[in-house]
Image: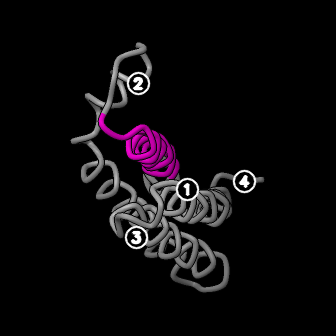
Amino acid sequence: MTSARSTPVLGIVLGIVLVAIGIGAYVLSSFASLTALVPAVFGVVIAALGVAARRTERRKLATLGIGVLSLLGVLGSARGIPDVIALLTGGAVDSTVAAVAQGSMILIGLVLVAAAGRDLLG
């Protein structure tokens, strides 16, 4: 698979993963917090941009959208980094579900930012 086609596919796959993480976090938090669905919202838009990048002549624009949206997701989840670190080192956190969801959002977002950057700059 060439680099120019990898970001759209990666966006679709990781967008679906974000949807699963968001829905899972919402269910595991006993439906207590709608903010648990934030990864799902990002995932739906990222996956849609991935589909658009595969089907249109505006591949670069859609890839840019994936990169920008992923960066926003990373920045928005960055406040959870202390909880992620605490969880990874065996410390206590207020919400394990939130820490895992934010950590996943950061990791997936960084992968997508790197892929989009590689496609757009390379």
Q: Residue furthest top?
A: 89
Q: Earlier in the sequence, mark 3 or mark 4?
A: 4
Q: Please tell me in which quadrant of the rendered image residue 53 appears.
A: bottom right
Marks 3 and 4, Cα distance to the nearest angstrom? 19 Å
**Residue at 52 percent of width and 49 percent of height:** 115
Query: Label 4 near label 2: C-beta < 8 Å?
Result: no
Regarding mark 1 in the picture, which secondary structure is present there?
helix
Q: Residue furthest right?
A: 1
Q: Earlier in the sequence, mark 2 or mark 4?
A: 4
Instruction: Give the answer, above or below, for where 89 lies relative to 43.
Output: above
Marks 2 and 4, Cα distance to the nearest angstrom? 37 Å
| Residue hosting label 2 | 87
Q: Name the chief secondary structure element in magenta.
A: helix
Q: Please tell me in which quadrant of the rendered image residue 39 appears.
A: bottom left
Residue toward you, 39 or 5: 39
Q: Residues within 10 Å of mark 3 (few under 14, many from 20)?
A: some
Magenta-tinted stretch: 94-115
Marks 1 and 4, Cα distance to the nearest angstrom? 28 Å
Q: Earlier in the sequence, mark 1 or mark 3?
A: 1
Query: Label 2 near label 1: C-beta < 8 Å?
Result: no
